[in-house]
Amino acid sequence: MTSAPPKAPRVSVVIPVFNGEACLEAAVRSVLAQSLADLEVVIVDDASTDASFAIATRLAEEDARVRPVRLPRNGGPSVARNRGFALAAGEWIAILDADDRFEPTRLAHLTRFAGEQGCDMVADDLAIFDLGCNAVVATAYPEMQEPVTLSLEDLLRHDLSADRTPYGWLKPVWSRAFLARHALVYAEHQRYAEDFDLLFRCLVEGARFQIVPEAGYVYTPRRGPVSGQTSHLSQTRQDFRAALRANEVLLQTHGERLSPGERALLQQRIAFFEMRAAYGEFLDLVRRRSPEALLHAARHPSVMAGALRAARRRLTR
């Protein structure tokens, strides 16, 4: 008699980790403590040089829902997440960064909501955890009072606002069937702003994406908004030149599928990253006291404008 194949879990949670021994266990335990128990945890160790994989292995020995895998060489967060996507067996796939955690009812709430609303993707507000204060100090989207259906134009327009947290920070729960149907994965060459890139391509493919106002994902930013302290747990390194190239690829690849308004907003985003990249390069030349700094500024007039704005802010503090 042939036994039935094992039932697929409701949710696969993919946790990429690189040298995260100080935070990995807390992240994993926040998943294992979910009110929705029908899940698996796929930990993808990105060739860590610390005890991350040993911790993942120990947690797997304690709970059969934990599945650790170790990559032979460091490929960055996109490579690690894609490996997790390939291994995931769940109806839904969630991402959890190793220095973050879930609130206990997050997955039950989001998957129930997604099923009721027919979503391909669903996300929630972010509880901002300031490591320097050792406390949640804010939410990312306080203006959100009820569920929102996110369009591609919404994503682009919102992320151009200097006064709002980018939607590119969102941590969706995806329908695995939707990702597979459209062959959607992270762009593996990207190590910065890779989340926005995948969100953009999902929306181009017509994903029904809703955001709920509850904050179920506890997010640790690179710099604490209250303490000003840089998180020693974060592996993120800002690379505006890489983000610029990635957005240029989006325009080249999908430009013909965009509305005029969407195309104009993406071009604005490209111009923004061009300015940020040039300004960062200018500051680096200044720090190194390079005579090239003035030539660089002359080639990029927006750099000088940015430098003047920064100087005015320092003088008026």
Image: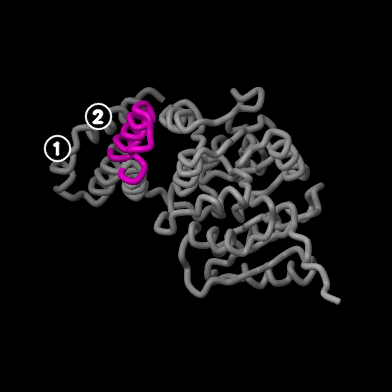
Q: Residue furthest right?
A: 1
Find residue 184 and report its horizontal and vertical position in percent.
50, 52
User: Can residue 127 be seen?
Assistant: no
Q: Which residues are the magenta region?
A: 252-274
Find out whether residue 280 is within the magenta segment. no
Q: Is residue 283 shown above or below 183?
A: above
Instruction: Tell which circle, 2 or 1, labels the residue nearer the N-terminal end.
Output: 1
Q: Could you say which is closer to the camera, residue 283 or residue 99? A: 99
User: Can residue 154 be seen?
Assistant: yes
Element at label 2:
helix
Q: Which residue is mark 2?
A: 305
Q: Residue at x 59, y 23 (%)?
A: 143
**Left or right of 31: which side holds 17?**
left
- Amino acid at circle 1: Ala
Q: Quadrant of residue 114?
A: top right
Q: Residue at x 47, y 43 (%)?
A: 196
- Amino acid at circle 2: Ala
Q: Residue furthest front?
A: 1
Find residue 89 and report its horizontal and vertical position in percent.
67, 60
Dot 1, how many residues are within 10 Å of its Cα: few (below 14), some (14-19), or many (20+)?
few
| Distance of label 2 from label 1 (alpha carbons) | 11 Å
Find out whether residue 267 is within the magenta segment. yes
**Left or right of 172: which side holds 154?**
left
Q: Could you say which is closer to the camera, residue 40 or residue 17? A: 40
Q: Which residue is mark 1?
A: 298
**Left or right of 11: which side holds 201?**
left
Q: Main secondary structure of the magenta part?
A: helix
Element at label 1:
helix
